Image (tube, helix red, strand yellow):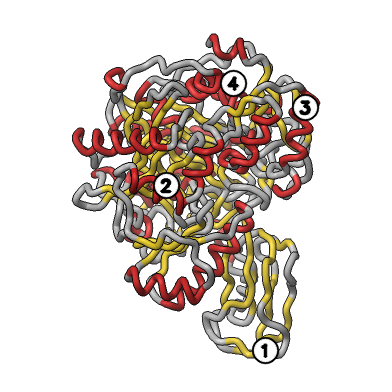
Amino acid sequence: MRSLRHIARHLCIGRPGFGKALVHRATRVRQGACASGDPGSARRLCIGRPGFGKALVHRATQVHVKMADEAVCVGPAPTSQSYLNMDAIMIAIQQTGAQAVHPGYGFLSENKEFARRLAAGGVTFIGPDTYAIQAMGDKIESKLIAKTAKVNTIPGFDGVVKDAEEAVKIAAEIGYPVMIKASAGGGGKGMRISWNEEETREGFRFSSQEAASSFGDDRLLIEKFIDNPRHIEIQVLADKHGNALWLNERECSIQRRNQKVVEEAPSTFLDPDTRRKMGEQAVLLAKAVKYSSAGTVEFLVDSKKNFYFLEMNTRLQVEHPITECITGLDLVHQMIRIAKGYKLQHKQSDIGINGWAIESRVYAEDPYKSFGLPSIGRLSQYQEPLSFADVRVDSGIQEGSDVSIYYDPIISKLVTYGSTRAEALKKMENALDNYVIRGVAHNIPLLRAIIVHPRFVSGDINTKFLQEVYPDGFKGHVLTAGGRYDLLATAAALYVAAQLRSQKFLGNLRVSSVPPETRCWELLVELEKGVYMLSVTHSGQNYTVEVDGEKVVVSGEWDLASPLLPITINGKYRTYQCLQRSASGEITLQYLGTSFKLRVLSKLAASLSKHMPEKIPEDTSSILRSPMPGSVVAVSVKPGDWVSEGQEICVIEAMKMQNSMTVAKTAKVKSVHCKAGDTVGEGDLLVELE
């Protein structure tokens, strides 16, 4: 990479823990990425906060920091004091003599003032110039430019909405449903769908607050919401000499709260003609603002393949690896070459589609709560599925890392590549089964359920996929009769294997007993409120389990120290994970992405368990606990107030998203246990009712 030798030192800011710029490139090359690219010999400088351990942004012991030549602290955890603090970052640049800055995905990556300050200081910004950032970063201005450039746009109000009442008036003129969105927004922040006047007022309030918190700009716009659309984006690449390419599309329709969850390239929906038209319009827009760097033009596409400009991201996208996989281009490499002033190396005719790539965003979230409410904690165990071919994991964390409330909850980008979509999906399924994450809740159960769902496999998707497939919320994998027998048999075999191991020390029997190979075990297993009697016969590595008259043969190496259980059940290969195993017989297994709690007891233990007192569940009808860790933004009640069912009593901000907390019944407030500015944890008591 000749360009890297010309830019001797590089500064990585933003969210370097999630693989930003050169630190990211070095990390993923180490992990065996499916896209090629040598990070070169340039010095890698990472700006961060050594040791604070916030989400994926930075810890002094993390992968990206270890691979950097230098690390510089820019401030405490709150973003306004660190990653959005331009003064601190400029000082770090001056101290280190950095010649170029790749801003990564978020924070200042689309901030025109930051790019201007870099230019004024003689530092190369690895991205577009300030005009393009301003023009495309402002949704109002970008829409006007798109119209002038003959790019299809969504009907809506192009000005700035002044207040909630004006928002209601505009929404009525456009016609419901409408989308309220931050003018300077991105990544799903500051966006609300409104179907009536009440939701418009509420959406205006929350969107403006989120926009101010995330971008320092609370301006909003309103446009027609296209129901049941697909979200498809076009990757563009443009140099400083007027050349521009479109690098095919990425399907990003699987979303929750307007944030992407699963992406793939190419899309199953686009035909070559539609793909070409979208690509050509994306290039027209890039040229209209004299764009130079990698960028993404996002479109909404309806069922008849009509497409409408949504926004342009003037930065590298989180999902860029899947484009790299199918085109063979290293986008960060291209961005650095362009920033140095080189012309594009490729023509449009050189860009093809080679294979299929899928990306799953692995989040530190509880998928059983609104498809994913943030989870915090320390990664007590962490193991990426890197031993498999065509699997790429972009991350900056390791075992022992902390995830906090301050930043985006994404843990990693898990990417699989195959010659066909079916092959890429199968590899993703296997990778998710072998991805070990302990210490925080994560969304692997949801990711796995998505990629094997018949609608997703057939390509029948839209941005409302999750709500339509799981109208009552995600509940995890539902066991079939066969799956239940497999799970019961695995738990029983694991229990017996552990019992047999406890009888030996250094391979020898602890006490004289009947040889374990000839013993038959009679067990009682509890699963999902059901009780099953099982008999287990052990012979070598095989365990024959009989349940309800069915025989299940479980075979495996039974490495009880490993979290992974690669076994065969009746000759079919499966990968389970043992999440928890106690001496009392409680076993938690992860099966097809979902965790199941089982209790395995001997006959004697089962006969005695009926004498144990049962724990009385807490009455939650008169209390409100925080469903997630976060910061209290506002509290709207006080002791003595009467509240109605569904009334908002406080707002919790977690990982840059604001969430309204409401009561479940009409009652009088007994006590309030939080105030604005407090930090609360999951399960903390917020309000008590009489």
In the depicted structure, whether residue 219 falls above or below residue 383: below
Whichever of callouts 3 and 4 sits on the residue coming sooner in the sequence is 4
Measured Cα–Cα span from mark 1 to mark 2:
44 Å
Q: Residue at x 51, y 61 (%)?
A: 220
Instruction: Look at mark 1 in the image and give the residue it sits on.
Output: 641
> Contact, CB < 8 Å: mark 3 with mark 1?
no
Instruction: Look at mark 4 in the image and give the residue it sits on.
Output: 26
Rate crowding at label 4 as few (under 14), some (14 to 19) or many (20 or more) other CA atoms within 10 Å.
many
SS under mark 2: strand
- Camera-near label (3 vs 1) is 3
Whichever of callouts 3 and 1 sits on the residue coming sooner in the sequence is 3
Amino acid type, callout 1: Asp
Instruction: Look at mark 3 in the image and give the residue it sits on.
Output: 94
SS under mark 4: helix
Rate crowding at label 2 as few (under 14), some (14 to 19) or many (20 or more) other CA atoms within 10 Å.
many
Amino acid type, callout 2: Glu
Closer to the camera, 360 or 337? 337
Q: Residue at x 51, y 73 (%)?
A: 164
Whichever of callouts 1 and 2 sits on the residue coming sooner in the sequence is 2
- Camera-near label (2 vs 4) is 2
* Left or right of 392 on screen, residue 674: right
